[in-house]
Image (cartoon, rainbow, N blue to C red):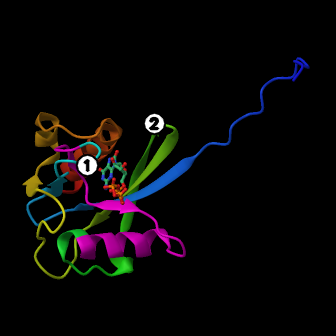
Amino acid sequence: MADDGAAPAAMPLRLMPVVAAALIDGEGRVLLQRRPPGKQMADLWEFPGGKIEPGETLEGALVRELAEELGIAVDAGALTPLTFASAGLGERHLLLLLYTIRDWRGTPRALEASALAWVRPAAMRALAMPPADLPLVAMLERLLQIGG
Ligand SMILES: Nc1nc2c([nH]c(=O)n2[C@@H]2O[C@H](COP(=O)(O)OP(=O)(O)OP(=O)(O)O)[C@@H](O)[C@H]2O)c(=O)[nH]1
């Protein structure tokens, strides 16, 4: 085909929304889970959560993910939006939406992760986490310094 000199058509942004939770305990620690071996970003520590399935709301997806990954029950009204991160992820663009949660029912168990840990935000710097999570950690650090 002849080159007509037109600029190449812009590719639409392939946005991938992911919802994630910072479960905060009474001592100001946050629950992280370790991604299992064999998965993309294996062994990195992340906030529990995941992708949204067709027909789900953001909050509905997070409530489902927390039941599947940790075996806990959370009311959608207990989810408080905190901040988000935006980062390129291969051919897609990750929009990672972080909620805080202080009330849930049940004791979190590692149903899909290889490990769980309750970590103060300042101590997260010592853990290997996905690069997109670093600004989220900074926001949590500020929130928990102020709010306890
Ligand atoms: N849950 C979670 N995902 C994160 C975080 N940071 C981050 O970059 N991600 C990325 O966001 C995507 C989360 O989707 P997911 O957890 O459903 O993906 P997955 O690969 O584990 O599951 P899948 O098998 O359903 O694709 C992954 O690409 C993951 O690497 C985080 O803190 N929590």
Q: Quadrant of the N terminus?
A: top right
The one of 92 and 127 positioned closer to us in this rendering: 92
Where is residue 18 drawn, in percent x and y?
42, 56
Ligand 1 closer than 8 Å to label 2 CB? no
Assess disc 1: are there few (<14), some (14-19) or many (≥20) residues with their C-alpha within 10 Å of its C-alpha. Answer: few
Q: Is residue 80 left or right of residue 105?
A: right
Where is residue 93 drawn, in percent x and y?
51, 42
Look at mark 2 in the image and give the residue it sits on: 90
The one of 105 and 80 positioned closer to us in this rendering: 105
Ligand 1 closer than 8 Å to label 1 CB? yes
Assess disc 2: are there few (<14), some (14-19) or many (≥20) residues with their C-alpha within 10 Å of its C-alpha. Answer: few
Q: Which residues are magenta?
A: 42-68
Q: Is residue 19 above or below residue 5?
A: below
Q: Is residue 43 above or below residue 56?
A: above
| Residue type beneath disc 1 | Lys
Where is residue 28 drawn, in percent x and y?
13, 58
| Residue type beneath disc 2 | Gly
Q: Is residue 85 above or below residue 147?
A: above
Look at mark 1 in the image and give the residue it sits on: 39
Give whichever of discs 2 and 1 has the lower sequence position. 1
Q: Secondary structure at mark 2?
A: loop
Is residue 51 highlighted in magenta?
yes
Q: Please tell me which residue is depicted at 10% across the width and 66% down the height of the picture.
A: 26
Q: Secondary structure at mark 1?
A: loop
The numbered disc on residue 140 is none
Q: Please tell me which residue is depicted at 47% across the width and 69% down the height of the picture.
A: 53
Q: Please tell me which residue is depicted at 25% across the width and 55% down the height of the picture.
A: 47
Find the distance from the CA under tag 2 to the CA under tag 1: 15 Å
Q: Tally the marks.
A: 2
